[in-house]
Image: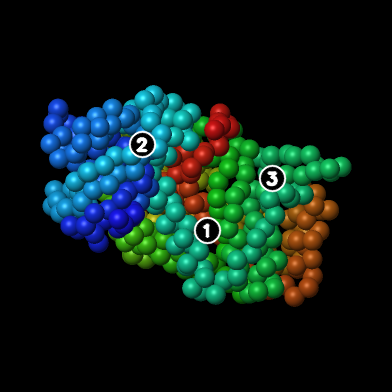
């Protein structure tokens, strides 16, 4: 008898098969049981008829609880009503471990998310998180394929670092023998070393930020993909970011149809990703936000009125806040590139334009309330300017002396960006909180399981 997976069952119609997995759900009457059987590759209905199987088999199928591990044997038959197009006429049910106190109800979903996250080690078996994490897996593979196909070198950056890339205080400090170390906030500075060696590299790994944020868009540990390319300037950086997002979203739409259907995701806005991203100067974005603030305040929708009060809350000339990003996403209804932010609000390594007023940086804002999913720009390639910026931003010179060396020995124009995997997954799947977009989320309130 063939031992097969649920995903391969359509190849075995009218054949006897063996399936190994778990009981996901069950319904039925006194004479007919319908077992929802899962094995990680899919879910299939196994029909157990009292008149067709030994009494012991029927009673076993009737008795076992949710998530009991079992081996099922039976014949694959066509069933046009099922998502798979097949079902299994069960003839035997062998119990590996019987369970009767599984702590998660089959119908439980996001309204109990805090309770469910306490049981995350088990909740990942349920349909919703299973679908989201399958999409995440495809997103990660798509990112790797995108850069591999373009001859980027995968370049690993250290997790332990001597200082902050961003020059901010949101660092996780860790004892490092006789020194103080920090968990990395970004692999960008190290990626720049690779760009000078290989031409174009991509750093892909976990990053850590000790931000005491309670929003649905923040984690303290998340994954970032960070390409860095020699001789790449701002327009090319925006091109690369746009192409990457289009590739990744397109791949998810193509390969994750079943998962997005399970999540009841309306993909109409995702499908607009093929269009060129509008490229909007920061000053233009400020004007749009000023008008949206006025328009939303007059709305009959209380949510828009509330959003109006938060737009430009940090004032003109400041970095964009979450409400600003949400409003811009609602206005344009597609990904947009906001570029040329005021130099003062960007990091020490960001190159200024010819006026000296604006940084040659860009953020890609996703619609549907997701906000920034990409941040990057052109790096300062002048030794003298970089040293002045380090001093201005109060970055300890000794902590970035190796980084300054890059401007002493063959400096060239270069740039790149970072994209948070979880926010990208959050957008593609439509999940309400970024906590759902990673197997084991870490926030200011959560370190377990």
| Label 3, residues with CA under 10 Å away: few <14, some 14-19, many ≥20 | many
For image coordinates 79% across by 66% down, the residue present is 405
Task: Please name whichever residue, 154 or 58, is drawn nearer the observer in this view of the structure.
Answer: 58
> Which labelled disc corresponds to residue 351?
none
Quarter occupied by the C terminus: top right
Secondary structure of the residue carrying tag 2 is strand
Task: Please name whichever residue, 194 or 449, is drawn nearer the observer in this view of the structure.
Answer: 449
Q: Quadrant of residue 50 in the image?
A: top left
Give the CA distance from mark 3 to mark 2. Answer: 46 Å
Query: Up-down: is 88 above or below 350?
Result: above
Residues at marks 3 and 2 touching, judged by CB atoms closer than 8 Å: no
Give the CA distance from mark 1 to mark 2. Answer: 56 Å
> Which labelled disc corresponds to residue 95?
2
Q: Label 3, on which residue? A: 183
For image coordinates 33% across by 64% down, the residue present is 275
Q: Label 1, on which residue? A: 362
Q: Is residue 280 visible?
A: no
| Label 1, residues with CA under 10 Å away: few <14, some 14-19, many ≥20 | many
Q: Nearer the viewer, mark 1 or mark 3?
A: 3
Secondary structure of the residue carrying tag 3 is strand
Give the CA distance from mark 1 to mark 3. Answer: 25 Å
Give the colour scheme shown. rainbow
Task: Please name whichever residue, 286 or 186, is drawn nearer the observer in this view of the structure.
Answer: 186
* Numbered label tally: 3
Quarter occupied by the N terminus: bottom left
The image position of residue 283, as x and y in percent, is: 48, 54
Q: Earlier in the sequence, mark 1 or mark 3?
A: 3
Q: Nearer the viewer, mark 3 or mark 2?
A: 2
Q: Is residue 121 visible?
A: yes
């Amino acid at each position: 008898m063939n031992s097969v997976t649920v995903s391969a069952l359509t190849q075995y119609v009218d054949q006897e098969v063996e399936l190994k997995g778990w009981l996901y759900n069950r319904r039925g009457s006194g004479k007919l049981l319908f077992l929802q059987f899962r094995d990680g590759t899919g879910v299939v209905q196994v029909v157990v008829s009292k008149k067709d199987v030994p009494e012991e088999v029927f009673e076993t199928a009737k008795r076992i609880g949710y998530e009991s591990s079992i081996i099922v044997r039976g014949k694959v038959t066509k069933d046009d009503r099922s998502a798979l197009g097949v079902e299994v006429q069960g003839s035997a049910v062998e119990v590996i471990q019987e369970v009767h106190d599984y702590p998660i109800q089959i119908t439980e979903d996001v309204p109990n998310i805090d309770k469910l996250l306490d049981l995350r080690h088990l909740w990942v078996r349920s349909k919703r998180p299973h679908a989201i994490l399958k999409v995440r897996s495809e997103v990660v593979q798509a990112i790797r394929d995108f850069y591999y196909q373009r001859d980027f070198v995968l370049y690993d950056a250290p997790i332990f670092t001597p200082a902050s890339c961003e020059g901010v205080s949101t660092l996780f400090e860790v004892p490092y023998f006789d020194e103080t170390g920090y968990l990395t906030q970004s692999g960008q500075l190290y990626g720049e070393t690779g760009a000078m060696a290989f031409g174009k590299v991509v750093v892909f790994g976990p990053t850590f930020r000790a931000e005491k944020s309670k929003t649905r868009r923040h984690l303290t540990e998340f994954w970032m993909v960070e390409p860095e390319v020699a001789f790449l300037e701002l327009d090319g950086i925006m091109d690369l970011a746009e192409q990457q997002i289009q590739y990744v979203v397109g791949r998810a739409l193509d390969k994750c149809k079943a998962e997005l259907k399970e999540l009841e995701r309306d993909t109409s806005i995702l499908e607009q990703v093929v269009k060129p991203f509008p490229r909007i100067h920061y000053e233009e974005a400020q004007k749009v936000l000023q008008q949206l603030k006025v328009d939303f305040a007059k709305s009959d929708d209380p949510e828009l009125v509330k959003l109006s009060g938060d737009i430009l809350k940090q004032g003109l000339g400041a970095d964009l806040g979450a409400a600003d990003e949400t409003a811009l996403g609602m206005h344009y209804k597609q990904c947009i590139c906001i570029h040329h932010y005021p130099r003062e609000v960007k990091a020490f390594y960001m190159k200024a334009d010819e006026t000296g007023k604006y940084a040659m940086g860009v953020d890609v804002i996703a619609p549907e309330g997701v906000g920034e999913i990409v941040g990057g720009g052109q790096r300062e390639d002048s030794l003298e300017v970089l040293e002045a910026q380090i001093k201005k931003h109060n970055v300890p010179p000794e902590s970035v002396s190796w980084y300054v060396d890059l401007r002493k020995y063959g400096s060239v124009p270069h740039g790149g960006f970072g994209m948070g995997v979880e926010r990208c997954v959050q957008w593609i799947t439509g999940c309400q909180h970024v906590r759902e977009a990673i197997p084991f989320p870490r926030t200011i309130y959560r370190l377990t399981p």
